[in-house]
Amino acid sequence: MLKKILFQLHWFFGISAGLILAIMGVTGAIYSYEEPITKILNPDSFVVQAQPGTMLSPAQLYAAYQRQYPDQAINAVTVAASKTEAASVNVAAPGSRRGKTYNVNPYTAERLPEASSEAFFHFIEDLHRRLTMGEFGKQLTGISTIILIYFIFSGLYLRWPKKSSAREWLVVKKNLKGRSFLWNLHAVVGTWVLVFYLLLALTGLTWSYNWYRTAAYNVMGVEPPQPSSQQQSRQQGGQPGGPREPGAGEQRKPNGERPMRAQQDGVPASGRGSQDSNARGKSKVNPDQALNQGWQVFSQTVKSYSTATFRLPEKGSTLEVSFVDTVPQHERARNTLKYNLTQRKIEELSFYKDKALNEKIMSSILPVHRGSFFGPVWQFLTMLAALSMPLFFITGWMLYLKRRNQKKLTLAAQQLSPLAGSDQSPWLVIYASQTGFAEQVAWRTAQSLQQANIPAQVISMDQLGIDQLKTATTALFVVSTYGQGEPPDHARAFAKKYLQQPVDLSQLSYAVLALGDKEYQATYCAFGKQLDQWLEDGSANRLFECIEVNYGSNTDLNRWHDALSLVTHTRLDSMVITKVFDEWQLQSRELLNSGSLGEPAFEIRLVAQHDALWNAGDIAEIQPGNSDDIITAFLAKHELHAESQVQLHDKQMPLFKALRYLNLSSNVTASIPQKFGVQEWLEQLQPLPWREYSIASVPQDGYLSLVVRQNKTGNGPDLSLNLGLGSGWLTAHAAVGQNILLRIRSNESFHAPDDNRPVILIGNGTGIAGLMGILKYRALHGFNRNWLIFGERQRERDYFFAQQLEQWHINQHLHILDLVFSRDQPERRYVQHCLLAQKEQVQQWVEQGASIYVCGSIDGMAPAVDEALIQILGEATLEQLTLAGRYRRDVY
């Protein structure tokens, strides 16, 4: 349940905050290289021609600039050691808290051209931090950053249970297709960038929330820097504090130095830019004298540097010099010299390299954020990680849409109701479904009718009243046959109550779609045929003959679609139920009953190549494949070449590969029309029919477990040609490590109860799979009122999952464990005999609210258990339990 909640939140946040994070990622990647890009695009703004003689000192720059622009109050002067690098002057600017910085010629103090990309990068910065929406945008980016942290840890957790190698975690599988490829790309690239995104998020939040920034300083054990008196007054006056970058008016120095920034990153700027033009006049310090003294002391004290910024005292008598090493660790690795002009002594000389690591980090939040703190390679990788942010938004949306599309056939159509404003009576679409497929077809039928402006209402047969049927004008029945020609469990009451005698339905027009499996020829579509005859006996008007569907055949469903199109005089949307299979890796195959008198039974474990969730009781639909031997024999029979190139699903591939999942035993394969050629013939072949298996595991196991018994279809010498389609593929033909095509279908009629009511679980043989899924689900939730009755041939050979079941019995997860092995005593005893022997206890558990689950063979076991329960509880009680969802079966 936790994983399901995390997954739901993960995709919900992804489709809501994903766009904001994508914008932040791209703009952040661009902004992280603002300085080198600006220098490349504007060389005349940062580079000068070297000239004979010495460059102007800070005092000379100050005086020369002041002569040219006497009405500007100078706050700071920056000089560079390189003879070809520009100097800069920061001046007060009305409306700007940091003033404006001009790059100047270090020999003449003449202004250099302003960088043309200044406005662009200011926009990028604003978009990155505030989405250009001011304080509201800042809150959106802050919340999205918190969501990014959730993505990191929830994504890691959602992947972590999978037992995979490093290659599975870190290598994108290019040969995957569709949803599997999207998920693999999303998950693997997400693993690559996980550390980068965590650093980006944890540092980025310092610009969003003051409380977070304060907490970060406390966690790192660093004293938060105190703002100046002017900063305090501004913050008290309502102006937001916190770390800020220069406004659009401030020009950048080539080395990234921004004169008006405080020494420590993450601290508000000094704010001299907010002073008016006579602000400097309030200081008693003589600028020429202060800069001369400071330059003399700095030159004597510091032997090598790249740039140095001299900030004139705002008040008092301390001149601060911020300088950068010749080869700095990063662009914000600044050293500080504080010189007292009155006392003529150095108050402080601190070097960035001497700071403790925690102090370095907290004084360099921006370099840590953009990655330059760890060097140019890490910065480049951080930029690539940021640029990849849209990938997760796009793939996440595509996965969401594909997942939604898969559910659309059964879930989206459930929103349908009779068309508003229509005076036409709605068509009833009535379904009877055991495992969910008939329900899916019913909803898809209703959706097609609705889109053709024909109002439709979908009803389960157990919710259908006879009076409702007597007043309806048109009804479509989509029903499956279960067991020995019986209706699905939820339709048994309706069939028993009404189908024994005709009911006058002369006002009703109807059609029946009967679902079945021709492998059970004697009972093929039996309930559908019985229902069709009952409707005819009731004088209902048949719209067209009953249409039979063999194991979900799309060809048969197309006949249903065409027939409805004729009677509605409308070309309805296609109702073909497309099975979208995902790729799962066959992780292991273990024989469970070595030496058994019965056929070999295997536990098959598969690992998803994508995010996979299911409920206990759900069904795994497998797309079987032909074995290599079958394909080879087929090619030899028809004298075809295995390596001949053909096109299938818009892809070129060898013929041998193309035949893997196609039905080679159909009439189409009887001969290959030479006049059409192999390609045209190939396109006529249908896929092999899928096979269904109960799931024996829960998602928390990290794998999907099936219990599959080999089914022999013949006695020929070649075993590979004599195994059942699904069982042969899973237990013999597919190699361990190979990808298997599988999809999970919800089977609500066998879902486990979500409370601690008593549960009686009855099954035999491979039916243990569905019961194991329920027991594992209840173990995860601490639901321990469980009674298992399991039957097989011999305890020594056929006791499936013995160790797990015995452990559950010892720790009382299984209150009662009854095992019935038919061949271990002279008389044959089966699970129904165990039930009858404990009649009173069964009655007691049912009276206490127990639900009964039956999983296993429909030949013998299921009807025998049904009869035993009727003897124990009475037919009326068992029928009530069925209607209440307390008697559920998954039998085959």
Image: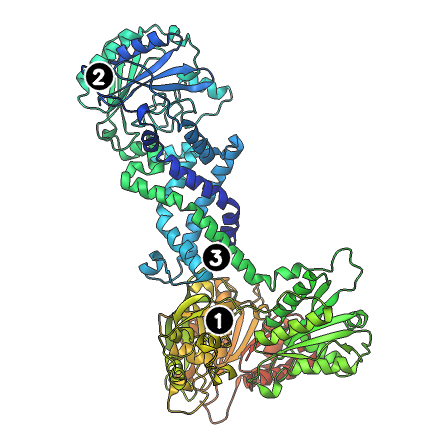
Question: Marks 2 and 1, Cα distance to the nearest angstrom?
Answer: 76 Å
Label 1 belongs to which residue?
A: 695
Q: Quadrant of the C terminus?
A: bottom right
Q: Nearer the viewer, mark 2 or mark 1?
A: 2
Question: Residue 440, how many percent across, how many down?
Answer: 61, 68
Total count of labels: 3
- The part of the image, by quadrant, that contains residue 77 is top left
- The part of the image, by quadrant, that contains residue 297 is top left
Q: Are marks 3 and 2 in contact (CB under 8 Å)?
A: no
Label 3 belongs to which residue?
A: 3
Q: Are marks 2 and 1 in contact (CB under 8 Å)?
A: no
Q: Residue at x 61, y 82 (%)?
A: 866
Amino acid marked by disc 1: Ile
Amino acid marked by disc 3: Lys
Residue 813, visible in the rendered structure: no
Amino acid marked by disc 2: Phe
Q: Residue at x 42, y 41 (%)?
A: 25
Earlier residue among tags 3 and 2: 3
- The part of the image, by quadrant, that contains residue 467 is bottom right
Tell me the element at label 2. Answer: helix
For the residue pair 497 and 654, the one nearer the viewer reads as 654
Label 2 belongs to which residue?
A: 298
